[in-house]
Amino acid sequence: MPIRRRPQRVRALTAVATAVVIGLVLTGCDASSADDKAADGSGENGPSVIAPGKPGEEAERISPEEAAEMADDDTPNSADFSYADMMIEHHAQALVMTELAPERAQSTPVKRLAERIAAAQGPEIDAMKGWLKNHDADKRPSEGGGHDHHGDAPMPGMATEAQLKTLKAADGKAFDQLFLKLMITHHGGAVTMATDLLSEGNNVQIEEMANDTVAQQTSEIGRMREMS
């Protein structure tokens, strides 16, 4: 089962908030009704939670209710938006490569692999575009934490223009070998990006997409290495 990895501050808050809730339940089992208000944290002297600060910041004391709210918040952050933007472009290049396979590949397994990749990544592009639209990408948070591979730095695993030109000119066995080489690297880059997102993102839906990418493309890398 995929494991959702939330940012460190949120993970810590989740653990602390859970411990507080358990403590309150156990206390309530033995407390009299007169003490219920204090035991459930609603009184002036109710329990509080120490929330870890961001790097360079001090910890702060908050209520269990505030801790639970922060732990449950999956508002997209800049890493979520960047991941969707980058993976749309990343997947699009994979589709460019798979479109060449029907006419240029010699191996039937390579052709079938290309079909499976296209069948998976086309809908994933649509899903990420839909996510961006639903979350009003024009009002995204400013870039802060998280990796941003836009700009001059290429995204992990992306083929260069020269490599794509060579692939488009290749045929038969030469195409098969180069296609597998480039796609293994391409998939590896996608896994790297998805793994980064699982550490830095905050939105459940995007993290589910990233988990799917890690599982599916790691499996395909193994198959492609066997075919190489």
Image (cartoon, rainbow, N blue to C red):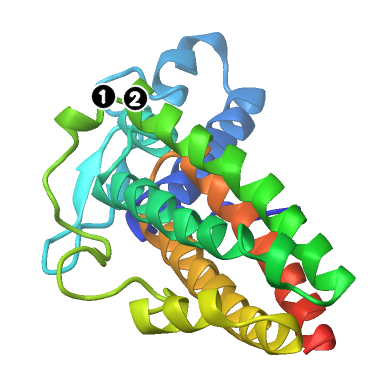
Residue placed most toward the observer, 42 or 146? 146
Q: Position of residue 83 (x, y in %)?
A: 37, 53
- Amino acid under label 1? Asp
From where the camera sits, is residue 127 visible?
Answer: yes
Picture quadrant of residue 23:
top right
In the orientation shown, which residue stands out farthest toward the top? 33
- How crowded is the residue under tag 2: few (<14 C-alpha within 10 Å), some, or many (20+)? few
Q: Position of residue 178 (x, y in %)?
A: 62, 86
Residue placed most toward the observer, 161 or 51? 161
Picture quadrant of residue 221:
bottom right
Q: Which residue is mark 1?
A: 136
The tag on residue 133 is: 2
- How crowded is the residue under tag 1: few (<14 C-alpha within 10 Å), some, or many (20+)? few
- Amino acid under label 2? Lys
Q: Quadrant of the C terminus?
A: bottom right
Relative to 23, residue 213 above or below? below
Residue 144 left/right relative to 69: left
Give SS at disc 1: loop
Residue 59 left/right relative to 19: left
Please count the marks in the image. 2
Marks 1/2 in contact by CB < 8 Å: the verdict is yes
The residue located at (42%, 14%) in the rendering is 37
Q: Position of residue 105 (x, y in %)?
A: 74, 73
Give SS at disc 2: helix
Residue 82 left/right relative to 21: left
Residue placed most toward the observer, 162 or 31? 162
Q: Position of residue 39 (x, y in %)?
A: 46, 24
Q: Could you tell me how far apart the alpha carbons at marks 1 and 2 are, in whole angstroms?
A: 5 Å
The residue located at (57%, 31%) in the rendering is 27
The residue located at (24%, 31%) in the rendering is 137
